[in-house]
Amino acid sequence: MVNLYPEIRYRAERLRPQRCVVSYATDKALLKALTIVKKQGLITEPIFIGPRKLSGMHNFRQSNSMYASALMAHECCVRQEADLIFQGHEKRQQFIASHLDGGFLDKRAVYLAAFYDRNRKQTFFAIDPLVATAPTLENRIKQLETITPFLKHIFKRKIYAAALAPIETINPKLTATVTAALLAQMSVRHQFGKFLQVTGPLDIDCALSKVAAQRKGVESKKSGNFDLYILPDTNSSYFFSTFLKYIGKVPTIGVLLAADRHLLLNSAPLTVSERVVEITLGLVAYNFSGK
Amino acid sequence: MISSLSEVEELAIAAEPVTTAVIAPEDHEFMLAVKDARKRCFIEPVLIGRRTVIEKAAKKVNYDLDTSRIIEIADRQEIANAAMDMLASGEVELVSKGQISTSYVYRAIIAQMKARQEEAVVSVQTFWDIKGCDHLVLLTDTGANISPGEKEKKAILNNALMVMQLLGYTCPEVMELISDSANLKDKHKHFKLVKTPVIKDSQGSYKQLEAQVLKKVLLGEDGDSINLNNLPHIMLMPDLNTGNVIAKLDFFIKEIVRVSCSYTSLGPVLLPSRADVAEGIMREFIFGVALVAQRRRLANG
């Protein structure tokens, strides 16, 4: 495995192997990644569900449609043949929607995007490019309650988060500024525990650059060095991730965190190494939730 | 077609100095950029604001104000109005914001647009010069409209087309950014997106890109590797939250160089961020001067 996301790799040490099922498996890169993860002892022989058997799929079950694959994968979990469902080649929305119909995601569900900053040689995270389209303050609180213990588990230290908004002053017309200010104040009062410190509202320039923050008169010791970015909504978060991944060439993976934690999404296109880390992150999350 | 900011600079270097109304230059970094821009014959500044504060900022960077025109006005809105009046009358060809809230400038622009009975939708155009991309990429609106509807987005697109035309993009490719989640929502409603209403129904000369996620545009037909040349010339942002976050990603992605302006029918209005340092502000002056040079060229046939 390449030396990306070291924090995630450390947390995967000594994990017990998990049983998994891959829904609509047609992707050779995923197969390669799973082979590596299996060799690392993190999973047992996966069950593959898909339209045709590929070399290396030892436990294969045929299904010609994406929807039927999702249902079969769901059944594997119900029958306790598998602990986790991996997204194969189906579209992410379809994959999630299939499982939403099955009542798999709860209100605390949050998609945590993970990036690797090559300059700082450090992993950082962002929420939420997928689940809550226009998050309310209540959504955000539930999301932070879900991810804070997990990030504490990953970093083994206090987590520093930037709540982003278009400006760093509070404007009632800009909901993001109000939400960010409230989250920051809640963290001051330790409402997310003592391990999460939220600063906000912060314009992204102040969050990413100490110089910019100083120029704007915003006091933030963590500018340029936050662990978590709380984006205003799904659109901004989705495009933040997309632009970093495709234009910034920043390694980008993710994990869907929820109280019910059976889904591992596929943030394709990924290199095999990135896919290995994404699966590893999912396994770390699964094990952590089970504790 | 101007494909990079170095070509923009060449245009600016070749231009006669541009008389520029500078709104509230009260910070040393900003004043340093004004000083350098003047020294390099890009601009001839008219400084508008509180004289004592302007003088203090100038002193900090050893800028001799004796030869510069200063218009003393204390009220923030009146400062912005004065600058826009000068642009409307032709007394100046370029306006630049200094240390003043952008909302004052927006209000002054809107007042001018209304007086001219023009569509009063102000928008900010952010240009990216990306290493590995063979053209400039315009992101809009990145600063003014909180949650633009279809009507506002059409006006935003029109503003973008106006400025792209100046840079020689006669038929730019346009894409309205749609996230996966938006696609998901529409699928549930059984509404198939082919082209967004904004792209489909706007006037002007541009190439319509089918509504699709950015990932697919970048990966192209083969879907194997990212080709930055596939980036559309104009990307319409869904809202201010997204526009603001994306426009400033140059703070993280070092391969991007950014300039922004709010282009109006009267001319360009520069809106450097309070976070920008002299180098970035200077880049914006150069960009504004190049746009004025192109306006002059078009006006002279």
Image (tube, coloured by chain):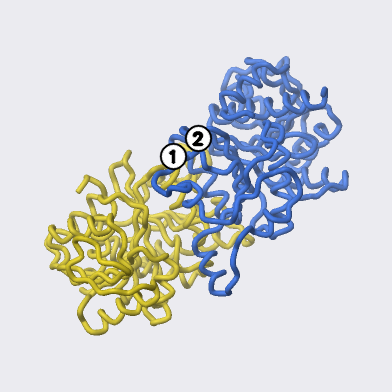
Chain of the residue that carries numbered disc 2 in the rendered image: B
Residue under pointer 2: B133
- Chain ID for yellow: A
- Name the foreground residue: B280 vs B233: B233
Picture quadrant of residue A2: top left
Query: Which residue is depicted at the point 35% across and 59% down?
Result: A254
Can residue A98 be seen from the camera position used here? yes
Q: Is residue B105 above or below residue A148?
A: above
Q: Is residue A220 above or below residue A36?
A: above
- Chain ID for blue: B
Chain of the residue that carries numbered disc 1 in the rendered image: B
Give residue B253's mark: 1
Q: Do discs 1 and 2 belong to a common subunit?
A: yes
Alpha-carbon span between mark 1 and mark 2: 14 Å
Q: Secondary structure at mark 2?
A: loop
Residue A16, image x, y percentages: 13, 68
- Name the foreground residue: A268 vs A217: A268
* Pointer 1 local density, CA inside 10 Å: few below 14, some 14–19, many at least 20: some
